[in-house]
Image (cartoon, rainbow, N blue to C red):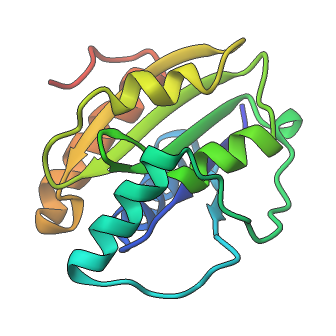
Amino acid sequence: MKTAVVYYSLEGNCALAARILGEIFAFQTGEKADLFEIQTADTKKRRGLRKFLWGGGQVLMGSKPALQPLDFDPAAYGLVVVGTPVWAASPAPPVRAFLEKTPIRGKRIALFICHAGGKGRALEKLEALLPGNECAGGIDLVNPSGNLQGLQAKLEAWVETLRGSAPAPA
């Protein structure tokens, strides 16, 4: 079963988790997951308070930013993993925009969120953006870049549950 990991990463945390997932799938299944990074057309870097105001405003306004083209065909994959940072207790607007432009239906999906605390209902909201799929599970990653060894172990256990060989990690 081919696996795709589709993610958006503003500060690199979701990108880190996606890369590690790709390696774990390669080790556990013998086939590395294909990684697809969602990128916005607006590449301006925002920092500090402006970043939080801008991101939270995007969520509250229901913005769907313009995206750079992404050559992703969901039909080519048996498992689609979707990852997003949490903005204002919700999936990041670029992920919402991507899922509206690229419908994923009839697939086995898995979800991951990255945040510094305060996930809210982000996993549930992300799953709601993917109707018509079988959700194999979701995982909540707090400060992924702050504990690489812990991140690796948590993602290894999660991939085992996705493959049906272990109980879900706490």
Q: Nearer the viewer, residue 36 or 40?
A: 40
Q: Nearer the viewer, residue 67 or 1?
A: 67
Which residue is drawn at the image coordinates 30% and 46% (left, top)? 88
Q: Is residue 8 above or below residue 135?
A: below
Instruction: Give percent across and percent down for residue 29.
Output: 56, 40
Asked whether the viewer can see residue 6, the reply is no
What is the residue that sits farthest to the front in this orientation?
61
Question: With 52 as the anchor, is 125 left or right in this view?
Answer: right
Question: With 21 as the anchor, is 116 left or right in this view?
Answer: left
Q: Quadrant of the C terminus?
A: top left
Which residue is drawn at the image coordinates 27% and 14% (left, top)? 167
Q: Is residue 162 above or below residue 64?
A: above
Asked whether the viewer can see residue 136, the reply is yes
Instruction: Give percent across and percent down for residue 108.
Output: 65, 20
Instruction: Give percent across and percent down for residue 11.
Output: 36, 74
Q: How many numbered markers are drawn? A: 0
Which residue is drawn at the image coordinates 65% and 71% (left, top)? 40
Q: Quadrant of the N terminus?
A: top right
Instruction: Give percent across and percent down for residue 70.
Output: 80, 63
Question: With 31 as the anchor, is 51 left or right in this view?
Answer: left
In the rendered image, which quarter is residue 148 located in? bottom left
Q: Is residue 6 above or below residue 137?
A: below
